[in-house]
Image (cartoon, rainbow, N blue to C red):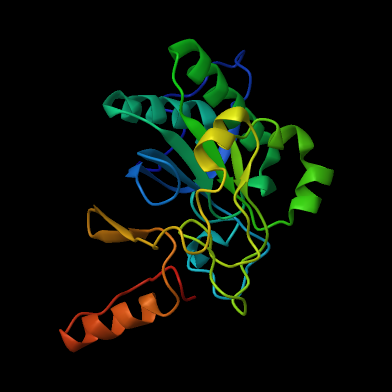
Amino acid sequence: MKIASPFSSPPSPDASPPVLLRLNKAHYPVTVLGYGRRVGLWVQGCGIRCKGCVSQDTWAAEGGSAVSVAEVLDWCKTKAASGLDGVTLSGGEPFEQPQALAALLDGLARWRQEAGLTFDVLCYSGYPLKTLRARHAALLEKLDALIPEPYADALPQGGAWRGSANQSLIPLSPLGQARYAGKDAPAAREKTIQVALEGERVWMIGIPERGDMAALESLCATRGLSLNQVSWRR
C-alpha cells in the first residue's frame, strides 16, 4: 500500500473528522504471520522498544503517514478480491492508537459480516496480556487472536509466529479457537521469511531466526552489496 495523504480532495466542512491511523506499511499477501493469505498492516509508533526488535523503523511516533481508516479498509477490500483468510496487525504498537484501532476493527467486522467472509483478525502487541485486559478489554473482544507480551531477546525463541518463548498465541473468538488453538507450539512450525519488492525497497516479512539478519548482511557484503536503512538497526 502506498502511504499518502488520506484524502484525494478536501473533506466537506460538514463532514465528521476522519479517524486517522498512523501507518508504517501495508502488504498483501502475507503468508508468514498467521493462517493462510493475509493482509498485513504495520502501524507506526511504539514506546516499548524491545531490545532486539527487527522493526525499529516503526518506533518513532512521527514516522509513517497518517491515513484514514476508511482508506485502509478500502485498500483491504480491493486486495481481498483475490482471496483473504485474515488480517494481521503489527507494528509498532497497535494499542498505542486505541481510537484508530477500534475504528479499524469495527470496520473489518462490518465488512466481514456484510460480505459473508470468514477472515480472522490477529493482532501483535508488546504489552503484557494483564495490561491489555485492564486497559483495552473492549478492543480484545473485537479480535480473533492475540500475540501479546514484549519481545525478550534473552529468552528462547517462540514458534513460527512468535518472537520469544514468553509470548503466547491466544485465541479470543470461536474462529480464533478453530484456527489457532495448539497451532504454533515451539516445535510445530519452522520460521519462514517472506520477501516482497516495492520499487527500490525490499521488505522481509516474518519472524526471523536469531542471527538471520546479520548473516544476510554478511552474505550480501561478500557479493559487493550493502543494505541501507535496515529496520533491525537504528
| Residue occupying the point 63% across, 31% down | 173
Outermost residue toward the bottom in this view = 222
Q: How many marks?
A: 0
Q: Is residue 66 visible?
A: no
> Considering depth in this image, is 7 or 120 the residue closer to the camera?
120
Is 125 left, or right, of 56 in this rendering? right
Outermost residue toward the left in this view = 223
Residue 43 position in % (x across, y down): 53, 48
| Residue occupying the point 48% across, 52% down | 64
Against 221, is 179 above or below? above
Is 12 left, or right, of 97 in this rendering? left
Residue 122 position in % (x across, y down): 54, 41
> Considering depth in this image, is 198 or 220 the residue closer to the camera?
220
> Considering depth in this image, is 77 or 36 the residue closer to the camera?
36
Against 155, is 87 above or below? above
> Considering depth in this image, is 127 or 167 the residue closer to the camera?
167
Is 108 left, or right, of 189 in this rendering? right
